Amino acid sequence: MTIDILAAEVVACQRCPRLRQYCEQVAREKRRAYREWDYWGRPVPPFGDPNAQILILGLAPAAHGANRTGRMFTGDRSGDFLFRALWQTGFASQPTSVRREDGLALKEVYISAAVRCAPPGNRPLPGEIRNCRPYLERELDLLTNLRVVVALGQLAFNVYLSILKDRGLIRSRAAFRFGHNAASDTAPRLISSYHPSQQNTSTGKLTEAMLRDVFLHAREGILNPPPLPPR
């Protein structure tokens, strides 16, 4: 198993009929601003540096963002905010990303999500989250150099903790509290962050400086990681 093979499995996934139907419907109907686009309309694979030391874990693709472009956080305002912060902290080759073929390269960073299909109302159902979790578990096994996981939003934070608990790496999820730029001494180290959704960025709940600080914190986690458990 390799990262590329796993990504191909993600793209071919049919585990959640409701999500597949919704993504395909959005791809047919499109948004007027993108009517010339050939929407991706399939599960969105992860991407980034296969030797990454940092995993960024989001919620799910946006209906007219990654579900349109076929790349995580690409083509929407959340991605604009995220990639600008990654570029400012030396993890991305450019500050913007509008399509898969735009030349963006990530260094030391890999981007994935708790759910790989755009959900209606941006709200996946619990069963859909469970269906997608095995892909994330396998990514964690394949990314052997990981030192830091950055969870964007509380849902991603909870999904990651559920994996740690089921693997016997933590006793209870109750001991962990979600907060912006808060770190937990798990191995890899877990850093939680507000999600760069338009709701958070337009209200000032999450600013550019706040998100930049998360990735500066993550870089510190690379330099001073907690001991890794035996694999």
Image (cartoon, grey):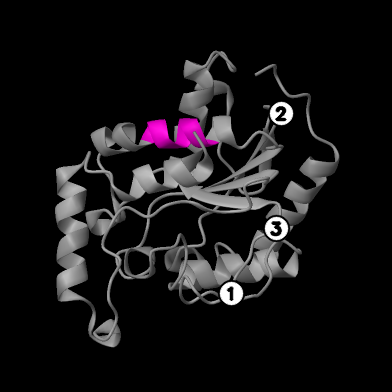
Task: Give amino acid for label 3.
Answer: Lys
Q: How many marks?
A: 3
Query: Could one spot residue 116 in this view of the protein?
Result: no
Front disc: 1 or 2:
1
Label 2: how many Cα within 10 Å (few below 14, some 14–19, many 20+): few
128 within the magenta span: no
Residue 106 seen in the current view: yes
Residue drawn where x is 68% and y is 32% of the image? 188
Mark 1: give few (<14), some (14-19) or many (20+) Cα within 10 Å: few
Q: Which residue is mark 1?
A: 103
Amino acid, disc 2: Asp
Q: Residue 195: x percent and y percent?
A: 50, 56
The residue segment tinted magenta is: 133-139
Q: Quadrant of residue 146?
A: top right
The kind of secondary structure the magenta stretch mainly shows is helix
Question: What residue is shown at x 67% (from left), y 46% (from top)?
Answer: 52
Residue 107's disc is 3
Q: What's the amino acid at mark 1?
A: Gly
Q: What numbered label is drawn on residue 185?
A: 2
Q: Does dot 3 land on a helix, a strand or a loop?
A: loop
Question: At numbered mark 1, what does the secondary structure look like: helix, strand or loop?
Answer: loop
Quarter of the picture holding the C terminus: top right
Q: Which badge, 2 or 3, comes first in the chain's sequence? A: 3
Assign a secondary structure to mark 2. loop
Foreground: 2 or 26?
2
Left or right: 222 with respect to 10?
A: right
- Mark 1 or mark 2, earlier in chain: 1
Q: CA distance from mark 3 to mark 1?
A: 13 Å
- Residue 45: where, in percent of width, then height? 42, 52
